[in-house]
Amino acid sequence: MKLIADLHTHTVACGHGFSTVQENVFAAQKAGLSVLGITEHGPSIPGGPHHYLMGAMLQIPPSVGNLRILRGAELNIINTSGELDLDRDRMSRLDIVLAAIHPGTPYDGKSQEEHTRALCAAMENPYLDILAHPDNPGYALDYKKIVRKAMAEGVLLEVNNNSMNPTHPGRKNGLANCQEFLTIGKKEGLRVTVGSDAHISFSVGKMEKAIKLLEEIGYPEELILNCSREGIEDFLEERQKRIQKKLKTEPFWN
Ligand SMILES: [Zn+2]
Ligand SMILES: [Zn+2]
């Protein structure tokens, strides 16, 4: 399986990354990628960026040579109502929006039921595209509910290469959890993405562990967003329609 996109990377701007946009771009080009997602952490992560950074993301060019750059964010789900830590106006200016629960943020859910409720509610946000590292063992989930909600809302689940790294401090059971949601997802026809979650340019495009798992499970390539540039361009068009549709139908108090 060849992936042409890494849809989850960070730079020094996120507060705990080590490389610049330029270094990540060079690394992506060297790795032969066609699309690179620069998805900085939302403001409520410890040591994270001010929300002004999200407004400035469009200063990054949409392409460098043949490399398409998606200017995005990995926002924090900050409560069990699924609220994200960025205002709608700034969210609307991003090319792609990931979200996850992270330790050290105001999120205070305690149980599997609460984490599942938080993620399901977050997926109703018109701008949310991808649930990042839903394998995180610190926040157990009911994967059947998560997969069905994701499919209903047009949200993708991420296979996070970093989660399968045995040296990752917080995701000891990441592999088993990925296996679980991918097994359900394959049966249901869930679309997924892959991300390196690189916090340094040397890791950009490094998605071997995720690829190995997807191959072992026999996950259909047509359900993996990173497999073709055309598929990603189609998804970006589709997301505009999804956003417009959800904005029209969501309750007026949102
Ligand atoms: Zn994360
Ligand atoms: Zn990340």
Image: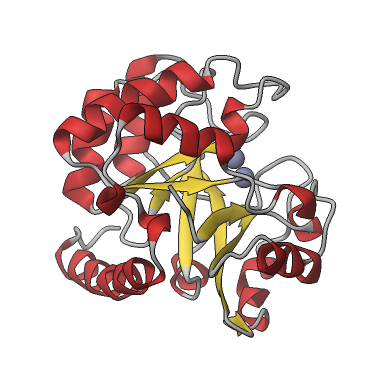
Residue at coordinates 30% horizontally, 33% vertically from top-left? 218
Residue found farthest to the front: 1
Q: Could you tell me which quadrant the C terminus lies in?
A: bottom left
Numbered label tally: 0
Q: Is residue 94 visible?
A: yes
Q: Position of residue 211 (x, y in %)?
A: 48, 39
Q: Is residue 101 visible?
A: no
User: Left or right: where does residue 236 sit relative to residue 9?
Assistant: left
Q: Position of residue 85 (x, y in %)?
A: 54, 51
Q: Position of residue 138 (x, y in %)?
A: 54, 18
Which of the pair 2/66 is nearer the observer?
A: 2
Snapshot quadrant of residue 107: top right
Residue at coordinates 75% horizontally, 58% vertically from top-left? 11
User: Left or right: where does residue 216 sit relative to residue 60?
Assistant: left
Ligand 2 quadrant assignment: top right
Whether residue 185 is situated above or below residue 89 in the rendered picture: above
User: Left or right: where does residue 184 sit relative to residue 217?
Assistant: left
Snapshot quadrant of residue 19: bottom right
